[in-house]
Every structure is written in structure tokens, then in C-alpha cells.
Image (cartoon, grey):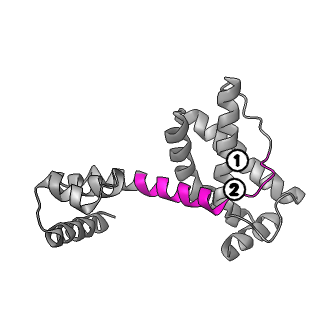
Amino acid sequence: MYSEDEKILKAFKREDQVIMKAFYDNHKEAFLSFIMGKFSMSADHAAILFQDSFTTLYLNIRKGSLELPLKSSLRTYLFSLGKYKALNNIRNQKNKSFVDEIPDEAVLPQVERMLEIEETKKKTKALLERIGEPCRKLLTYLFIEEKDYEEVGRLLGIEKSGTLRKRKFDCLKKMRALL
């Protein structure tokens, strides 16, 4: 199920610097966005938290706490470490203390899915800033506010659901072009 992550885990055990750096670079920005958005944390504190969480991930792999078969993706595990560290930080009200225990239980697939949804919403919002007002309204109602087609049609003054679906298609096409 997590075959790519299992290869990455093995690379961490071999201390493959190229794979480790790629994993670090590939997840840093999303991690920072998640932590800053979820916990209203400054970029500097989120960066410290990322470094601490990444180090904990690495140490857990090296000492054998994280073994095959994986029960969640390494990304979810990393984000969970950050979440628990941020919560602990908030509980203690000490912005410089990022000490936390490693969760004993595997991260549920629902948590991983929730993180993916949050990241997608943030990317969508960023793209909506660059797209025209009619598309921004339509896609905001559908994907961010999660309104149904009937309600969106009523809000935009579009009576036919086919017209609404066509506009949605065209707007998504514009967004893909912006990507």
C-alpha cells in the first residue's frame, strides 16, 4: 500500500542523502503551510517545528521505531509529529519548547486524507486569487464552502444545472492552465 514510502524508509536507513534531502524539500512547504494555518504559528516557529519533526522522523527510522510494513505514509507520520509537537507547544505556552512524545499508534488513513484535503483547499484558494471573479465565486461556493449545485445555481442566478456544470468545467480548465 505504501511501497514508495517503504523505499524511502529503506533509503533513510541507508542514510541516502539524496533521497533524504528530496523528502525534506518535497514536504517542507506543505508542512509549513499546514502548521501555520492550523495553529496560527509564525513561519519561523513552523520552520523550527518542521526541522524538529523531520529529525524525530529520521531518528525513529534509525533506531527502528518505525518499521515495515508501514501503517501510514511517511508524509502523514511527519505531519502528525508536527501536529503533536505544536499541540504540546500550545499546551505548555512555551514557543521555544518543542519536546513531545512520539505517538504510540499508527496514524489513521482518515487523518492522511484530511491532510490531503486541507492542502488541496489551500492550493485552490491560491489559484482562486489569480482567476476571474465569476469563476472565483463559482468554485468557492462548490469547493470551499461545499454548497450543492442547486444552492450555487440559486446564488449565481443560473437556473439550469447543465449550464452550471459547463461553467464549472470551464473554470476548472482555466485553473489547470494556471497550474
Q: Quadrant of the C terminus?
A: bottom left
Tell me which residue sits at (71%, 25%) in the image: 92
Q: Nearer the viewer, residue 80 or 98?
A: 80
Q: Report the residue marked by disc 1.
A: 81
Q: Is residue 38 above or below residue 29?
A: above
| Quadrant of the image occupied by residue 20 | bottom right
Residue farthest right in this picture = 63
How many residues crowd around disc 2 within 10 Å: few (fewer than 14), some, or many (20 or more)?
Answer: many
Q: Residue at x 60, y 40 (%)?
A: 47
**Label 1 near label 2: C-beta < 8 Å?**
yes
Boundaries of the magenta span: 102-121
Q: In this rendering, does residue 135 appear at all?
A: no
Quadrant of the snapshot with the N terminus: bottom right
Q: Which residue is mark 2?
A: 77
Q: Is residue 66 left or right of residue 133?
A: right
Q: CA distance from mark 2 to mark 1?
A: 6 Å
| Residue type indicated by callout 1 | Leu
- The kind of residue on which mark 2 rests is Tyr
Compare residues 145 and 50 and report the one nearer the observer.
Answer: 145
Image x and y of residue 93, in percent: 66, 23
Residue visible at 60% across and 33% down? 45
Task: Give x and y (percent) for residue 33.
Answer: 50, 46
Residue at disc 2, secondary structure: helix
- What SS does tag 1 mark? helix
Return the mark for residue 158.
none
